[in-house]
Image: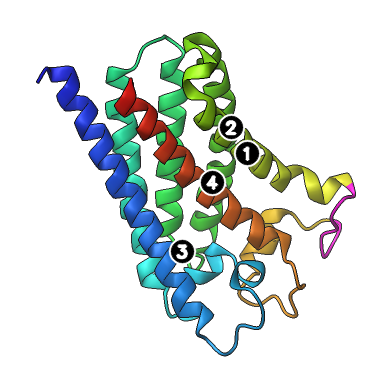
Amino acid sequence: MTNKDKIKQLSIRFGLLGCFGLFLGLAISIVIESTNASVDGFLLFKKSISELGYYGHSQSALLLNGGLFFGSLCIALANLFALQVTKGWLKYPFWFSFSASFLALAVTGLFPLNVYHLHLHGLSYLFILVCFSSIAFMAYAIQIGWREVKLPLLLATICLCLNLSVFILPYAGFISAPLLTATYMDIIASSATLSPKPDLWWQALTQWGSDITLVLWVLSLLSWLKKS
């Protein structure tokens, strides 16, 4: 086995471990909170991930935040290993920004909503960096041949749309915010005390959709990396 193969194996193993950690934290949180009698309706429509990680408010906060922190760190490390075994100079802006995205996600787990400003800073950087990573990957896909990475490219596009919607929808007139001056971050910050919540709370649904799609994107990249 060559040194390149060993690095590729490390990337795949750390990536899978990170995805498992994120999935386990999210899945257990959904199960625990769904059995809570105070949740009326489908959980993903009612509670944001930030709210589930709020200590003193959520029973699953420790598990969720642990999964976010350790899972994200593993994936960030996997991305840096992948950087060493992939081709093309456009890999640098993609893999570095992708690693930074997961460091920002790790920050949201390390500093939950209880640590108000640090959590919101991590969340803000996460949305911005995922948008940048998606665009960087599109450019990278063109360089290496987009047919090789059709599924990762599709998931990158979905991630870009979901994360851009956070900044665009409240101001485009398609979906109203509670206040004209209320940003996505303001609403997430007050999610633990916001009541009553709408039947379909788009802010929570966007955060869930973004994080789940991000994990699927990582898995598709690991599959591509294994075949390459």
Task: Assess disc 2: are there few (<14), some (14-19) or many (≥20) residues with their C-alpha within 10 Å of its C-alpha.
Answer: some
Check disc 3 and report the residue beneath it.
112
Quadrant in the picture for residue 95: top left
Q: Which residues are magenta?
A: 173-180
Quadrant in the picture for residue 132: top right
Check disc 1 and report the residue beneath it.
158
Q: Secondary structure at mark 2?
A: helix
Task: Assess disc 4: are there few (<14), some (14-19) or many (≥20) residues with their C-alpha within 10 Å of its C-alpha.
Answer: some
* Residue 213, label in figure: 4
- Counting from the top left corner in percent of width and height, residue 42 is at 64, 74
Of tags 3 and 2, the one toward the viewer is 2
Mark closer to the chain start, 3 or 2: 3
Mark closer to the chain start, 3 or 4: 3
Vertical relation: 77 (above or below) 1:
below
Residue at 41% x, 18% y: name it.
92
Vertical relation: 217 (above or below) 5:
below
**How was the colour assigned to the protein in this rendering?**
rainbow
Check disc 2 and report the residue beneath it.
154
Mark closer to the chain start, 3 or 1: 3
